[in-house]
Image (spheres, helix red, strand yellow):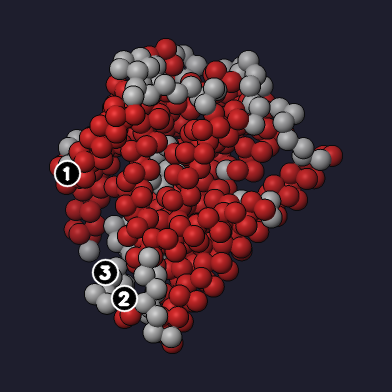
């Protein structure tokens, strides 16, 4: 069995590396192909992957947890823009107002249409609200310092709302009796919302700034070519996440802020130099952000493969029923477009930018993580199968629909931008 797994994993990785350029030309995304491969390898066909979302909830939670951390760190490193730049207004609105509207819509749908309890409906809304920072590569910033409003907003939104959805997951668990919210929900407001969000962002920011400045000082003043940027990056991710968890803050926001802070330190010191390419000599490259980003992007590809294989193996034809498909359709075609259209009404975006932002709310890694997190923390009621089916079907449909439309839609957008310029 071990030899079979070695052959399988080796074949997938080699194929992924050799076909990277070819995959960009296909009408479907790489994630869709990995999803199909996961289904073929799953229990309904070849049976190599035998996972169950209830039985293996803790394993899936840990795998997707690592996937989210790597992707959020990479997103933070991509965004080389000052925090006081007006560009930040859109992703903040999308990750707050639009996310709240989306959760409200899905909660109402689950409560009234599917007959879920209020706690289960809120959980489903919180699971499906975050957009994915991994699978939306076609609509993210193309290079560090990209100031396109649409790409920057979707990238920043994916980095922020994976952590910003956590309070509502805790709210759903609280209403199911699985989390202490305190009398009149005071503990939820004080700890799960104000403290955990604020402390997570603040802690990650100062750790990222301190780390980046320490590396730059050692290389510039002490002339030490530290090297091993990949280990330094992994160390910062682990430290930011671990310290945040110890302080009961949200580690996802902490890791995102740490990556953002590392890029900010470099940007302040070199405001006109994109520094996307590593210098030939490590001694001349004082800042670690470019090398850390290169390492994180490589890990992202492995993350994408792993998570899509898991989702594909969990899928079955029985899950595409009247409980799950309407939820997915309502999210992708009604809740997301409505939430984006309302939250971006005063941003001065073009109709095309608003339409593309409304459509490209890709669901993926974060949704699967929150699903596994809730199940592993005891959210096992009569409503659980409905929530599981809705989340898995939504991820699958989002990957297929958004993946097949991303390349032509963004090409049309780029041509329109060039004509307007």
Question: Could you classify mark 3 by the number of other residues whose Cα lies within 10 Å: few (under 14), some (14-19), or many (20 or more)?
Answer: few
What kind of element bears circle 1? helix
Q: Quadrant of the N terminus?
A: top left
Q: Quadrant of the C terminus?
A: bottom left
212 and 97: which is toward the camera: 212
Question: Could you classify mark 1 by the number of other residues whose Cα lies within 10 Å: few (under 14), some (14-19), or many (20 or more)?
Answer: few
Q: Which residue is mark 1?
A: 18
The reply to whether callout 1 and callout 3 are in contact (CB within 8 Å) is no
Question: Could you classify mark 2 by the number of other residues whose Cα lies within 10 Å: few (under 14), some (14-19), or many (20 or more)?
Answer: some
Cα distance between the residues tagged 2 and 3: 12 Å
Q: Is residue 10 visible?
A: yes
Marks 2 and 3, the one that precedes in the sequence? 3
Tell me which residue sits at (40%, 30%) in the image. Answer: 310
What kind of element bears circle 3? loop
In the rendered structure, find residue 277 and report the number of the disc placed on it: 3
Farthest residue in the bottom direction? 221
Q: Which residue is mark 2?
A: 282
229 and 391: which is toward the camera: 229
Marks 1 and 3, the one that precedes in the sequence? 1
Cα distance between the residues tagged 1 and 3: 23 Å
Quadrant for residue 107, please give it: top right
């Amino acid at each position: 069995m071990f030899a079979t797994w070695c052959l399988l994993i080796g074949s997938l990785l080699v194929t992924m590396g050799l076909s990277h350029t070819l995959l960009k030309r296909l009408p479907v995304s790489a994630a869709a192909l990995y999803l199909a491969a996961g289904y073929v390898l799953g229990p309904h066909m070849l049976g190599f992957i035998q996972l169950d979302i209830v039985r293996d909830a803790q394993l899936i939670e840990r795998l997707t947890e690592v996937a989210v951390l790597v992707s959020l760190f990479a997103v933070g490193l991509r965004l080389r823009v000052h925090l006081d730049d007006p560009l930040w207004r859109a992703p903040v609105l999308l990750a707050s107002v639009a996310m709240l509207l989306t959760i409200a819509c899905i909660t109402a749908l689950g409560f009234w249409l599917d007959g879920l309890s209020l706690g289960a409906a809120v959980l489903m809304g919180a699971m499906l609200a975050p957009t994915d920072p991994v699978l939306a590569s076609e609509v993210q910033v193309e290079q560090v310092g990209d100031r396109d409003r649409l790409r920057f907003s979707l990238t920043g939104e994916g980095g922020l709302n994976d952590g910003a959805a956590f309070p509502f997951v805790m709210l759903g668990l609280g209403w199911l009796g699985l989390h202490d919210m305190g009398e009149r929900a005071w503990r939820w407001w004080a700890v799960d919302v104000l403290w955990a969000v604020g402390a997570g962002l603040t802690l990650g920011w100062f750790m990222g700034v301190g780390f980046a400045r320490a590396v730059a000082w050692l290389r510039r003043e002490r002339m030490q070519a530290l090297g091993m940027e990949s280990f330094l990056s992994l160390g910062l991710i682990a430290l930011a996440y671990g310290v945040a968890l110890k302080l009961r803050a949200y580690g996802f926001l902490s890791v995102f802020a740490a990556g953002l802070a590392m890029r900010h330190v470099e940007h302040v010191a070199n405001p006109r130099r994109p520094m996307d390419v590593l210098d030939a000599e490590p001694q001349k490259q004082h800042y670690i952000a470019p090398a850390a980003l290169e390492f994180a992007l490589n890990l992202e590809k492995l993350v994408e493969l792993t998570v899509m294989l898991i989702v594909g193996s969990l899928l079955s034809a029985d899950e595409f029923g009247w409980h799950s498909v309407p939820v997915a359709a309502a999210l992708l075609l009604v809740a997301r477009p409505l939430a984006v259209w309302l939250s971006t009404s005063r941003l001065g975006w073009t109709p095309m930018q608003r339409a593309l932002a409304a459509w490209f709310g890709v669901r993926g890694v974060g949704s699967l993580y929150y699903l596994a997190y809730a199940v592993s923390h005891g959210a096992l009621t009569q409503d659980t199968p409905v929530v599981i089916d809705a989340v898995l079907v939504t991820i699958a449909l989002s990957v297929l629909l958004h993946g097949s439309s991303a390349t032509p839609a963004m090409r049309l957008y780029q041509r329109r931008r060039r004509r307007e310029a």
